[in-house]
Image (tube, rainbow, N blue to C red):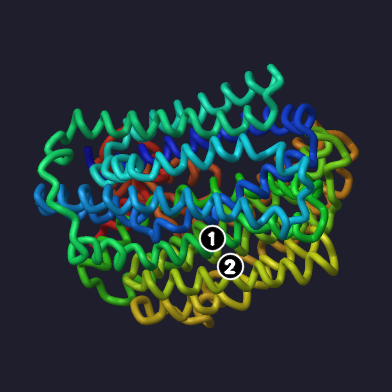
Amino acid sequence: MSRIRKAAVNAVFGYSQFAIAIASGIVLVPLTLHRVGATSYGLWLASGEILGHAGMVELGVLGVLPWLIAEADGKSDRAGMRRLVGNAVAVATFVGALYLALASAGWAFLPGLLHLTAAERASIYGPLAILVIANAVGYPLRVFSAVLSGLQDVYFNGALTLITTAAGVSITAVLIVKGYLLYALAVGAALPSTSALFAGLYRVHVIAPDLLRGWPRPSLAEIRPLFKNGAGVWLGTMGWALLSATNGIVITFLGHPEWVAVYAVMSKLSTMSTQVSWILPDSGLVGLAQLYGEHREASRLRHVALMMLRLHLLLAGAAACGVLAFNPAFVTRWVGGGFFAGLPLNALLAATIVCSSLIHGLIATASVLGNRLRVGSIALVNGIVQAALSLLFGYWWGLVGIAAAGILAGVVTAIPFGIVLLKPSTQLTLRDLLRDLLWPWFYRIAPIAVAAATVGFFYRVGIVASAALTEVVLLWYVWQMRAQYAHLPSDPRISVWLARFGLVTPVEPAAAASAAASIAGPASAGVAAAVAVLEQP
């Protein structure tokens, strides 16, 4: 299977997984809030964030392992792959034991810091124990999932992910209805994921059995490169964990655990939209890495980096307008007006989509271009600054302050330093970013954002009317941004249709036929084009 088609398959499965997650969230969150209650659910979310931070003990080894496996596979170095797998299993087993110890210690000390009563602590102790044990057991098994990713077993991985997601939703819903409450959330998260890890082990046994035997004895000399390569990934993961998995802890620390559920519900659509908007541009990162490995000139890397950042910005802008216009009606209809925390918070959540997408584009691109350790450090600093600002602003302004803290932290840390890290390999400067990317996008989106906010202001007209008006706003956005599409890659087969609607300049038939013939497989054209441009000489 070609590299283009694999990227397309990954993206299709990624979008399918998010579709299931969105659909299930619409059903599960109201059911959970109704049966479990806002306070208990908020405590569960905050406790899950604590476990997420304990998971940082793996130091990025499992995150970087797929890339190392893929590199060794490209060299046909099966002995090197066996060494990687054996050493990674040894490291992951140790990490699982360390995680178990840290999670237990965290649960012993943090409830007092979070002002939990004895009854509240007792209510979530058992469910959390299930998750902790499942995660600890899962660490060594995750090595084999990483192996499958490195071998690009895209169909198996994608199908398994979809099955796991659907199974988790079904198990959770059934157990909640039967009255198991927080245990339903724990079992619904732990059982499918652990089963999937065992399925990954069996899959490796089927397609690459030689990687499961003949492991050399682990040694510090062999393990050190794993930690060295994983250090940047670990720092970046820690930073993103502070960005995404700290708000619940901060809110609970401030004495309002019931606000955790409110913030989670309010940010649900924006969080999902942000992650969905990253899938397509991220599919081109492998191609960018190949260009960099070929020692392409800075002008070529600059062009590709700007292209990927532009795609991030265009998709994030559409998502932000959708949240501005539709989220107020969606939240009030979905779980009730008591969970809608106001239009100012909604506006900040929409702005967060754009800010975090720009940060992600800069950070991911800079990491691919050889600055992994420094990129991880910047992501970590960004997360620390946001956590500190969230405590301060949350104390002053509540949920609005917590949302504002994330934007301000990114503006003063990750964005400027991300540009600095991109400059050596791309010659991209802040002036270039403002002139060629941000300003052309901003002056086009400004009136649309005002219109979207106006639609959101009148959310009481009902969800059907809000949805219709949101669709009008998004169509306006698509039309208004048409000048930006010329800077993006596009499969000529798609460009022909876009040209008919006046969104792009028509392409020459001969060029279209030639380019179309070069794209293998019937997969997602937009994803294929994103990778195809990166492969051009």
188 left or right, relative to 425: right
Tag on residue 383?
2
Q: Quadrant of residue 193?
A: top left
Q: Nearer the viewer, residue 465 or 481?
A: 465
Q: Is residue 370 above or below residue 325?
A: below
Residue 456: image x %, image y %?
A: 82, 48
Q: Position of residue 297 (x, y in %)?
A: 27, 75
Q: Which residue is mark 1?
A: 240
The answer to which of 326 and 274 lies nearer the viewer is: 274
Tag 2 and tag 1, C-beta contact below 8 Å: yes
Q: Which amino acid, by three-letter code, is at mark 2?
A: Gly
On the image, the x and y values in percent for residue 531 come to 33, 51
Q: Quadrant of residue 59?
A: bottom left
- Is label 2 in a helix, a strand or a loop? helix
> Residue 65: horizontal and vertical position, in percent?
29, 53
Determine if residue 157 is in view: yes
Left or right of residue 323: residue 202: left
Instruction: Please tell me how crowded label 2 is: few (under 14), some (14-19), or many (20+) other residues with Cα within 10 Å.
Output: many
Viewer-side residue, 242 vs 429:
242
Badge 1: few (under 14), some or many (20 or more) residues near its Cα, within 10 Å? some
State the separation of the CA atoms marked 2 and 1: 6 Å
